[in-house]
Image (cartoon, grey):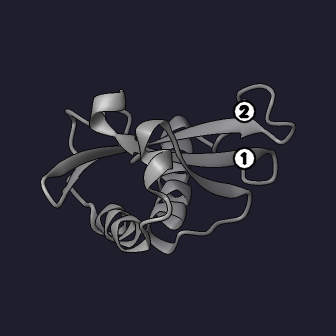
Amino acid sequence: MTEDEKKARIAELNDELRTRRKARNGKIIVTGALIEETGDSLKMTKILDAIRDFSDFSEANDPHGERDYGRITVDDEEFMFKFDYYALNEEVLSDHPEDPNVTIRVMSIFYASDY
């Protein structure tokens, strides 16, 4: 697989988790101050819907073409999402984020101010 093919596959897998909220070996987590808001299901639904609908990937926020980061605004609050890729043991980073057979894909969601 070429580097461009790997990037395209990573982007495809990221999009799958971001837009469908599920993927093989995929997890969505909230971090920072947003953890305190997880009981507000309406707010969390709005955030997840905004992430699902996000399409403003550009050279500025996606220089590697992997669609692994975004910044959104929901009800005048700014949030970010980013992807990380771990080996199946979740102790080290994955050497092959393009391969869901050996990678746990984690999308973290948090307040932009927590970054």
Answer with left or right where residue 39 lies relative to residue 42.
right
The location of residue 12, given as percent across then percent down, is 50, 59
Q: Which residue is mark 1?
A: 104
Residue visible at 22% across and 45% down? Answer: 78
Quarter residue 45 falls in: bottom left
Residue drawn where x is 73% and y is 53% of the image: 100
In this view, which residue lies farthest toward the right? 89
* Helix, strand or loop at mark 1: strand
Q: Is residue 70 visible?
A: no
For the C terminus, the quadrant is top left
Left or right: 39 in relation to 99: left
- Residue 3: x and y, percent? 53, 36
Circles 1 and 2: CB distance less than 8 Å?
yes
Task: Give the residue drawn at x 83%, y 42%.
Answer: 88
The x, y position of residue 60, in whole percent, is 20, 33
Q: Earlier in the sequence, mark 1 or mark 2?
A: 2
The residue that appears at 44% across and 69% down in the rendered structure is 19
Image: 32 above or below 81: above
Up/down of 93 relative to 66, above or below: above
Residue type beneath disc 2? Ser
In front here: 62 or 74? 74
Quadrant in the picture for residue 89: top right
Q: Which mark is residue 94?
A: 2
